[in-house]
């Protein structure tokens, strides 16, 4: 029987205080944004109506939070229960990732006090892909919190309530698979609206499929990354056998993505643009070089059994697939002559603050709540 157990150990460690400091700096600039308006902290303009808070925190951030989605898809939809030990840690990262991505949208939109209108049916625009994305992400955040409730009930030993909740949990698991499938592909659909303003290196009718595939690739990669990092940080034995199997699935998803991505650009006749020496073309090459490096590492079954090489492959995947999404929304987007955008220091610190809050939440939860498997013997950790 699979048993979870808190890792234990001190909360106020060196890494915790470091991320707490970053969070407090981000909180300062966030407070300034709400007191003096978005122009006081951001370099966004009419040409670039969204900056890193959307491109990084939402578009890349929700993909990084897809560990829960991919594990639910694999474990429950594909009935591969051997991956179940990875579900709860992945759910925790998804919970913080999606919730804080939603919070970053509230920082980004100008009239945040009108955000409640999205849940009013008479204001709904059913033809808007942006409406679908917003509604799906909002609903998925709620689903994630409900899926996380059993962890808290186990902690407080509310067995009867846990038993009742488990009877209906399959409904929320099904929603937890459906909703990300919808909005992750729709994040790609959104950039189809950019038309000729998006570089042909990224503009394609395959955008919805490519965004869905990157959600799967990043989701699998972040589970591998998080598991290996937790093993080192909390002095736990690595889950190499199960991660090796997961890496095999990741390899085939990545191969499919790379074939579609490269062949699509090549068959449309835009491959020469990738070698014209411009900043945009160099970012295209960097993105694909990172992904190709991960593909070559995962190609050999022996590499998938090495924790070091698995960690390196997961890192390359996170950087490459994350850069693909960032390039689609920022680097490859050209609104016309005269418009420029580079994030301000305040924007960067707010993003770092959001990421830091997610890491702080993860640190606290794995030490205080039954998240990791019990075969990982609880140990006092300074991480």
Image (cartoon, rainbow, N blue to C red):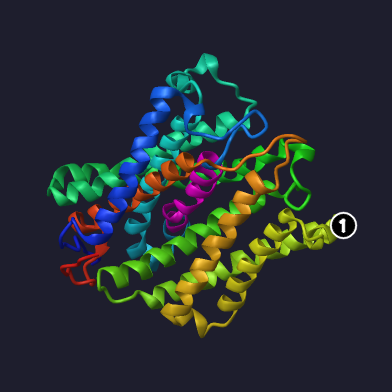
On the question of residue 51 being in view, the answer is: yes
Q: Which quadrant would the C terminus be assigned to in this image?
A: bottom left
Give, as a single range, the part of the protein colored magenta: 53-72
Q: Nearer the viewer, residue 240 or 173?
A: 240
Q: Check the image and name the residue furthest to the right.
A: 269
**Which percent across, then down, holds residue 377?**
19, 72
Q: Quadrant of the N terminus?
A: bottom left
191 or 56, which lies in front? 56
Question: Which secondary structure class fits the magenta region best?
Answer: helix
Magenta stretch holds residue 324: no
Residue drawn at the location 60% of the way across and 50% of the way down: 326
Q: Is residue 366 left or right of residue 170?
A: left
Q: Residue furthest left?
A: 157
374 up-or-down from 54: above or below: below
Furthest-top residue in view? Answer: 122
Q: For the point 46% across and 24% down, which residue is it?
A: 37
Say how many tags the image has: 1
On the question of residue 78 being in view, the answer is no
Residue at 63% from the left image edge and 40% from the top image edge: 341
Image quadrant assignment for residue 186? top right
Which residue is denoted by mark 1 in the rendering? Answer: 269
Find the residue positioned furthest to the bottom. 302
Residue 373: x and y, percent? 25, 66
* Left or right, residue 308 beside residue 335: left
Q: Based on the displayed image, in which of its 4 quarters is residue 273 positioned?
A: bottom right
């Amino acid at each position: 029987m699979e048993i979870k157990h808190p890792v234990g150990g001190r909360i106020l460690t060196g890494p915790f205080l470091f991320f707490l400091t970053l969070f407090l700096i981000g909180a300062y600039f966030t407070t300034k944004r709400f007191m003096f308006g978005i122009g006081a902290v951001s370099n966004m303009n009419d040409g670039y109506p969204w900056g890193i808070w959307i491109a990084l925190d939402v578009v890349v951030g929700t993909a990084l939070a897809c560990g829960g989605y991919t594990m639910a898809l694999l474990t429950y939809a594909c009935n591969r229960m051997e991956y179940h030990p990875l579900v709860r840690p992945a759910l925790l990262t998804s919970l913080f990732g999606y919730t804080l991505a939603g919070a970053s949208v509230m920082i980004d939109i100008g009239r945040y006090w009108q955000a409640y209108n999205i849940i009013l049916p008479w204001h709904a625009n059913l033809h808007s892909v942006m409406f679908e994305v917003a509604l799906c992400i909002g609903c998925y955040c709620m689903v994630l919190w409900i899926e996380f409730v059993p962890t808290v009930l186990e902690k407080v030993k509310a067995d009867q309530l846990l038993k009742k909740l488990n009877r209906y949990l399959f409904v929320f698991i099904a929603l937890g698979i459906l909703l990300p499938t919808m909005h992750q592909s729709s994040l790609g659909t959104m950039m189809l609206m950019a038309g000729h303003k998006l570089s042909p290196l990224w503009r394609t009718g395959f955008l919805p499929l490519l965004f869905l595939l990157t959600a799967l690739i990043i989701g699998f990669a972040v589970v591998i990354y998080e598991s290996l990092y937790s093993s080192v940080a909390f002095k736990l034995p690595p889950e190499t056998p199960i991660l090796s199997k997961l890496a095999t699935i990741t390899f085939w998803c990545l191969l499919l993505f790379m074939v579609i991505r490269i062949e699509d650009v090549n068959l449309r006749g835009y491959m020469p643009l990738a070698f014209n020496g411009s900043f945009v073309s160099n970012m295209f090459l960097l993105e694909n070089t990172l992904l190709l490096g991960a593909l070559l590492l995962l190609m050999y079954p022996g590499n998938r059994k090495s924790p070091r090489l698995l960690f390196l492959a997961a890192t390359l995947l996170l950087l490459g697939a994350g850069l693909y999404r960032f390039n689609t929304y920022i680097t490859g987007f050209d609104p016309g002559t005269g418009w420029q955008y580079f994030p301000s220091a305040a924007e960067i610190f707010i993003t770092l603050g959001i990421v830091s809050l997610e890491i702080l939440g993860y640190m606290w939860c794995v030490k205080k709540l039954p998240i990791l498997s019990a075969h990982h013997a609880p140990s006092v950790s300074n991480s």
